[in-house]
Amino acid sequence: MPYPSLKSGRLRFLEDPQLRDLDQAVRAVLADVGVQVDHPPAWEVFAGAGCTIDPDRHIVRIPSDVLTRALDSAPRQFVLHAPIPDHDVDVTLENVYAVAGSSALHVLDLEGRRRPAVHQDLIDLTRLIDALPRAHIMHAMVIPQDWPQVGFDRRLFAAILSNTTKHYYSQGAGGASIADQVEMAAVLQGSTQAVHTAPRFSLVVCFISPLVHGREPVEEMMACAEHGIPLWLEPTNMMGATAPLSVAGSVVEHTASALAALVLVQLLRPGHPCILATASGGMNMHKGSYVGASPEAVLAHCATAQLAHFYRLPFQGGSGLDACIPDAQAGYERMLQVAPMALAGVNFIHLAFGMIDQLLTASYEQAVIDHEILSAAFRLAEGFEVTPETIGLDQLRAVGPGGNFLTEAYTVRHMRDFLWHPQLTTRVGWEEWQAAHGGQDMRQRANRLARRLLEEHHPSLVTPTQAKELERMAIAFQKTAIRRAESG
């Protein structure tokens, strides 16, 4: 039985004529401007479907009818499998889930130190995210800096699969890494055929904006199509730098890039599961840096969700916090992101836990604060039912003017159904706050909760023998990747 999910889509920024205008712009970009594809074996696939190839510039131009056929073959509903069925994710155009953070190089640890991430941080942050009910999909919160960086994806794979009960949103480093990951997953699933049939991981493929598909991500897509691994197709742009400054222009650029990838995958394997994705943001015009938590970035993600659904495709959007510590800025930035996205039907809210400092740092405290904020945003997006039971007219008649509903059975019966119950938020006066919490602020309470979760939560689905074998394989695969890199 998959995770219960929020079904949303109440908030719409675009009317149907605007969606059609964006669609026409996307099709014009693909047919006239084209996409740079730096892997010649893919050119043959595109050319065989009627696309035009400029081999000198590596440009692939995709006619509108080729795009339409790819959209027709892409599935609208599929399952992302997890180690336990209760954590399976039912992908539809309506369901809304949350995905963990992504690949920070530093941590803000529970002692308040910002330092390079190490192997133990990866394990601890994975366990922490695994303990949060609203974190539906696992992603690597950090890339440990005490490892060799070439081939690090294999080490991530082994460490995360040994410490989570959730579907893993993996990443690669070229086509060879996909085969390595499949082989490691087979240790847990029994065979490579079992992995091909119901993989417990999917793969994000990242593209350079504007409109560049490098050799490694194209290799990864082709390998995932071969092995049956679901794909997240993620271009990321900066408005005014690697995309037009406007929200509409940004949406057109990253949507065209993602759809070009979708076309390749559907040509290789019609019906292969794909999720359109982006982590696009703005640019600090004073500093030239990425801005993730801006109103414009949120608008772009919400609008792209609508456009993806116009194409009948699931969508992932999200970006990290610009705040550098878990403070008031981090709180308002997170709610600015997740409330509109949940309301707008962004199917997967990405980078949703603990990613601060413009994605450079992962914070243990912020991860649990973000879970609280996301939980409130999901409750808002759920809305409320209007039925005879929820209206409670019989209750009003029974209690009458001047009465009290507190002791009514109706109130007790629905207390957990109708109300959001926070875990970190305080709802008491000054004296009780001082007595119960020692005057601790949200960050201090989050620190205490994170420590408790890390002490108590130890996923144990993987046997010690399996964990040891995964680590052995990962190190061996990484050494092979390093040798390949050194030999050119």
Image (spheres, rainbow, N blue to C red):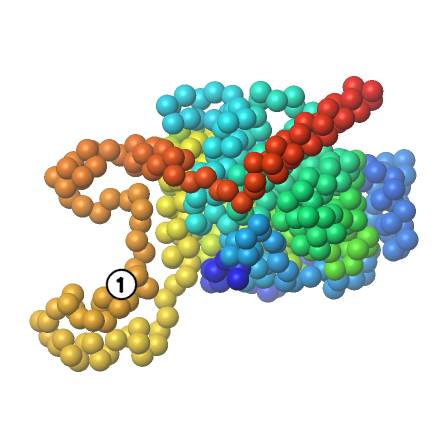
Total marks drawn?
1
- Which residue is at a point 31% across and 76% down the rendered structure image? 389
- Which residue is at a point 64% across and 45% down the rendered structure image? 188
Image position, residue 124 (x, y; %): 47, 32
Q: Quadrant for the C terminus, please.
A: top right
- Which residue is at a point 87% across and 49% down the rendered structure image? 45
Q: Which residue is mark 1?
A: 415
The answer to which image quadrant residue 390 occupies is bottom left
Q: Residues within 10 Å of mark 1 (few under 14, many from 20)?
A: few
Horizontally, is 79 left or right of 408 in the view? right
Horizontally, is 420 left or right of 318 in the view? left
Image position, residue 108 (x, y; %): 43, 26
Q: Amino acid at mark 1?
A: Met
Residue at the extreme left of the image, as rendered: 402
Residue 30 in view here: no
Image position, residue 295 (x, y; %): 47, 44
Q: Nearer the viewer, residue 386 or 466?
A: 466
- Which residue is at a point 72% across and 60% down the rendered structure image? 74
Q: Nearer the viewer, residue 228 or 285?
A: 228
Please tell me whether mark 1 sits on a helix, a strand or a loop: helix
Image position, residue 363 (x, y; %): 44, 31
Residue 40 in view here: yes
The answer to which image quadrant residue 394 occupies is bottom left
Residue at the extreme front of the image, as rendered: 465
Q: Is residue 211 above or below residue 94?
A: above
Q: Is residue 190 above or below residue 155?
A: below
Q: Is residue 46 above or below residue 72?
A: above
Q: Is residue 292 above or below residue 418?
A: above
